């Protein structure tokens, strides 16, 4: 192999496998001399790849962890696996999958060959991820278009459906994508409203990066997550639907935290096998009652009172649903006979 760039890429691909390569084996695989391999190793080091050499009669090379993340080479199967994983996480707003993951997905899909992009889409369409159901499912392509516009400083156009069902067309200067662990939101400057806005990404349709560049404006307080929290709190106060919730659980805090959506907050331990959740939410009490029931342990509602009423209603409905077909009629007949 006489083409130096191609040879370096082939050498890097071999070194990225988790093993040590004797210099003679690398030379044989690439059809060059051991001296050429040594020069190529030096070139890779100059490019920032931390290649470690072992001493000895044979001598070997392996890629190790360095101080910075160098570019990686992925084969077809690896690229598809990573893209499918990132799409699944991004599409369901899984806790811990934040804007950095979406940016990685946008970069990967930008360079994926069409044959691999088709495989990724086929795999995703054929599988159903099991999620906790705390947020709306969104198309990962929507996220990648938005992430690309944020990173590239491009104005973005999209259709938007508000909470009351009103459909509008928006043109914005996107600032940041923010994941709450339940939903994705876009923080952006709305050119039509001439003000900063937050948009639920699951209500966005047909996003399109216009190609028009802009100089980023200064966000109030400069923190997108804080801006989103204040915006959500303000909307909650305006709607007067927020309620204070306090629930005690007869289970360790780790158990409860893993089974509650992150947006409800973190329970605090009250003993070795108990904890308490204090939070404020604008969710409906019926939905909150169902989420608490799904935790899977004994719990007591301290406040609000109407939440306990919802749980009693839910419990009665579940008991009725669990009766054998015709059970209620049979019980009534027996009662009449007695």
Image (cartoon, grey):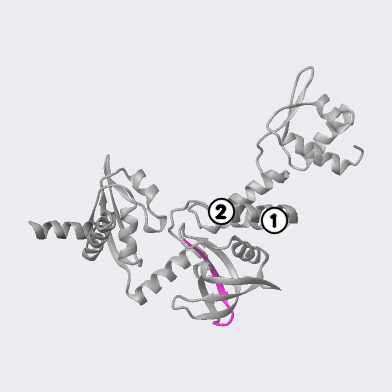
Residue 334 picture location, percent across and down = 13, 56
Q: How many marks?
A: 2
The numbered disc on residue 118 is: 1
Q: CA distance from mark 2 to mark 1?
A: 15 Å
How would you rate the neighbour count of disc 1 (Cα within 10 Å): few for under 14, some for 14-19, many for 20 or more?
Answer: few
Q: Residue furthest left?
A: 338
Report the residue marked by disc 2: 88
* Residue at image point 52% right, 52% down: 129
Residue 255 quadrant = top left
Stretch of the chain drawn in magenta = 183-194
Residue 196 painted magenta: no
Residue positioned 15% across, 59% down in the render: 333
Quarter holding the N terminus?
Answer: top right
Q: Earlier in the sequence, mark 2 or mark 1?
A: 2
**Is residue 188 rendered magenta in the image?**
yes
Establish if 260 lies above or below 2.
below
For the view shown, which residue lies furthest in the right direction? 2
């Amino acid at each position: 192999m006489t083409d130096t760039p191609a040879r370096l890429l082939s050498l890097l691909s071999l070194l990225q496998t988790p093993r040590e390569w004797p210099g003679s084996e690398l030379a044989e695989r690439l059809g060059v001399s051991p001296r050429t391999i040594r020069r190529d190793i030096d070139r890779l080091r100059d490019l920032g790849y931390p290649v470690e050499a072992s001493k000895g009669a044979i001598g070997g090379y392996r890629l190790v962890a360095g101080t910075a993340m160098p570019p990686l080479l992925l084969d077809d199967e690896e690229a598809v696996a990573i893209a499918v994983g990132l799409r699944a996480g991004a599409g369901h707003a899984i806790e811990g999958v934040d804007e950095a993951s979406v940016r990685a997905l946008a970069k990967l899909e930008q360079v994926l060959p069409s044959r691999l992009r088709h495989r990724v889409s086929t795999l995703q369409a054929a599988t159903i991820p099991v999620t906790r159901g705390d947020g709306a499912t969104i198309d990962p392509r929507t996220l990648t278009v938005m992430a690309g516009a944020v990173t590239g400083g491009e104005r973005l156009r999209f259709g938007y459906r508000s909470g009351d069902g009103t459909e509008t067309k928006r043109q914005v200067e996107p600032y940041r994508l923010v994941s709450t662990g339940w939903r994705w939101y876009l923080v952006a400057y709305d050119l039509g409203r001439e003000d900063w806005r937050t948009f639920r990404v699951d209500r966005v349709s047909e996003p399109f990066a216009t190609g028009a560049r802009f100089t980023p404006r200064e966000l109030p307080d400069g923190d997108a997550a804080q801006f989103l929290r204040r915006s959500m709190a303000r909307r909650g106060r305006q709607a007067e639907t927020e309620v204070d919730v306090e629930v005690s659980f007869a289970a360790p805090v780790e158990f409860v935290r893993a089974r509650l959506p992150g947006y409800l907050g973190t329970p605090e331990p009250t003993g070795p096998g108990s904890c308490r959740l204090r939070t404020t939410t604008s969710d409906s009490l019926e939905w909150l009652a169902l989420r608490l029931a799904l935790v899977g342990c004994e719990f007591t509602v301290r406040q609000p009172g109407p939440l306990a009423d919802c749980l009693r209603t839910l419990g009665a409905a579940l008991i009725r649903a669990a009766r054998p077909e015709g059970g209620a009629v049979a019980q009534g007949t027996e009662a009449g006979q007695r």
